[in-house]
Each structure stands twice: as structure tokens, then as C-alpha cells.
Image (cartoon, rainbow, N blue to C red):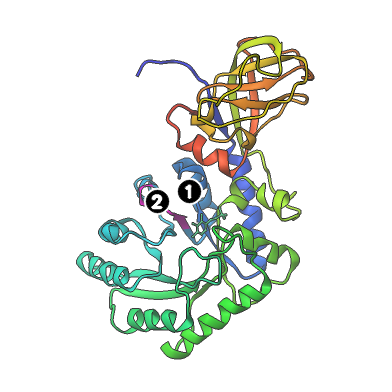
Amino acid sequence: MSLKSEYPQLEIDLKKLRENIEAMKLLCDRNGIEIAAVIKGFSGIARCVREYEDAGVSYIASSRLEQLEEAKNAGIKTKTMCIRIPMISEADDLVSVADCSLESEISVLCKVDKAAAAKGRIHEVILMADLGDLREGFWTTEELIEAALITENELKNLELVGIATNLGCYGSIEATAAKMNELIERAEAVEAVIGRKLKYIGGGATTSLPRLIDGDMPERINLLRIGEGIIYARDLPDFFNCDMSFLNNDVFTLKAEIVEIKTKASHPVGNITVDAFGHKNTYEDRGMRKRALAAIGKVDYCDFNDIYPRMKGVEVIGASSDHTILDIEDAECELKVGDIVEFDIRYGSGVFLTGSSNVKRVFV
Ligand SMILES: *Cc1c(COP(=O)(O)O)cnc(C)c1O
């Protein structure tokens, strides 16, 4: 490829990312908690993963084996964890690129055990308990115990290192101290039958961090899988009323170039049908307004509500696949065609932007 354009561009501040990792690690260390650092929120970009390794997290974790493989290929030595319960068809790949995995099906455990045997490896396993969020995990303690006993006694190439749960993903269930205690109860029921203590009890993801901030995380929770809370640091202040001001929420800067500036009507003129995606929209009539078109669109970030212009007075009012429409009537600075506008991003837009081959990456 010989195209020279630098935009749209995602600028990644590795120093700010590192500061976030260190700050989160300090908070977790103080609470006796190890971090499985989840890298899927930035598509596993290896240069970012390096910062986590250098900061000394316990695991590099992703739902996608491709990202764990990329990390290993980039020379990452930190143990890796597969956090989407694996496809039975990827068992061989799993034991090649993941040192540990979350599991919830006995048939898969048996297949992973065989795959590990074939490679002469011991693969770590964390069994998932579903506490009501209704995504992955064993529903009853009996089922959890059965899987634990099989893993412990029959599957010689697997090491049962812990019990964990996931909350706040499908069922939107809050990670309360009561939920954490319920998880500990289930883990202790497993410990009673296998006759030893488990290394880890994994209390969830970013949505469990309020327990550390509020100081009511039960003591036996000693592992969290943290993605968003380090990378973007926006969900807890925006949705959980949590003060996370000790973290940078501008690790990433999205930059796009302005391709048109015109004063136009704010309400479409003619019969309104559906937009480019077949959706019916409503449009507020604010009279004639100065607008800018930026050369970036939904294919890059998905939802225009998940990108935030940094310049005061600039507002994202809509988007199609490849265009973003900005109201700049009240912009604090004069803008012209060819200028670059900057945006903050969050988890929802970040997963798309880091996954898009159209968006150039620049590290600072
Ligand atoms: C994505 C994911 C995480 C990380 O979630 P964040 O909200 O980004 O911290 C943790 N565990 C599992 C199983 C996940 O799929």
C-alpha cells in the first residue's frame, strides 16, 4: 500500500496508560488482589500489552486467542488467560497460546486436558460460577463441585487454580459485597470436597472495583480481570458514580480531518424516510447552523454517542458509515477544511477504532 494519509488516527499515550496500570495495581495490591489485565478493549495492541507486562500484572487476558498469540509472538512472557470460555474446536490452539482459561463445560475441560497432554503442558483452569448475570458459568453449586472434582482428580493435565464469576455483562447485575460473599461460599464448598485451598477466587471485572473504592471487598477475593477500568476509566464515574479521578481517561485521542464546512438547515428538507442504516431518526430544528463534516464514520467507531469532541462548543449530531456531522456554530475556535478535530473515546468506540485497519495508530 502506498497511501500516505495519516487520518483518521488514534493516538495512544503509552505513558498515561502505564500510569493507569500502576495506579490500579497499587489499589489492588493494597487489597490483596492480583490483576488479570484484559486487553480486548484495545484489540490487544502489543505495544500497549508491553506496558502491562512491565508494570507486573499477573496475567494478560483476552477473549480472543488471536490477541494472546500476538502477545506471545511479541515476546510477552507474562502468563496469558483466555477469558471467553473456549470453543471446544479451539482446544489445541488454547493450550498453545493461553496458560490459563475460564471454563464452564465438562466436555470442553476433557478436550482441553487431552490437548494439554499432547503438548506435554499443564493448563490452568478457573471454573466459572453464574451468580445471576446469566452469561457463562455453572448454575448450581452441585454442578460446580462435580466439574471441580473431575478437573482435580481425573484430568491430570489441568490444574484447578480457582473459581470466578462474571457480573454486569448480560444481566447487568451489580457486584455487591453480598454477591462476592456468595462466590466465596461456592468456592469454599469446592475447597471442602477437593480438600485444599484454591489459589484464586476471582470476583469479576471493572464493575467489581467499587468494592475496593468503598472498602467492602471481602478478604478472600484475590483476583480481578480488569479491562475498561484501566484503559478508558469512564464507566465507573459515568454509570456507577465512582470517583476514578486518580486515573487518566485520555489515554487515547481520536483525530479526524474536516472535509466540509457549511452553514445549513438543521432539519432535513423534504420527506423523511430512513437513514443509511434503515433507521428512522428524529431531527431537532435549530434553524441555520454552521456544521463540519469529519472524514470518519460509524464503520470506524460504531456509535457516534461514544465519541466526544475535545473542543468546547463542538457537538456530534450524527453520522453515516464514513462521515461524522459536527455542529460547530458555537465552537470556541475557528475551524476550516483540512483542520484536525480531536475526540475522547470510551470502551464502545475504542474496541471498534482499535480493530479497524482504516484507523492509523500513533504512539506517544
Ligand atoms: C471483557 C471481560 C472482562 C473485562 O471486562 P472490563 O469491564 O473491561 O473490565 C472480564 N472478564 C470477562 C469474562 C470478560 O469477557
Residue visible at 51% across and 23% down in the picture? 322
* Residue where numbered disc 1 is placed: 40
Residue 285: % across, % down: 75, 21
Residue visible at 70% across and 62% down in the picture? 210
- Residue type at numbered disc 1: Lys
Quadrant of the drawing holding the C terminus = top right
Residue visible at 64% across and 77% down in the picture? 219
Find numbered disc 1 in the image and state the secondary structure of the residue it sits on: helix
Circle 2 residues within 10 Å: few <14, some 14–19, many ≥20: some
Residue 241: name its quadrant: bottom right
Numbered circle sitting on residue 212: none
Question: In the image shown, does 72 or 305 lie closer to the viewer?
Answer: 305
Q: Is residue 273 above or below residue 182?
A: above
Residue 170: name its quadrant: bottom right
- Residue type at numbered disc 2: Arg
Over which residues does the magenta segment extend?
60-66
Residue visible at 23% across and 69% down in the picture? 114
The verdict on residue 137 being magenta is no
- Tell me if the residue at label 1 has its CB under 8 Å from ligand 1: yes
| Of callouts 2 and 1, the N-terminal one | 1
Residue 48: % across, % down: 51, 43
* Residue where numbered disc 2 is placed: 64
Residue 238: % across, % down: 72, 48
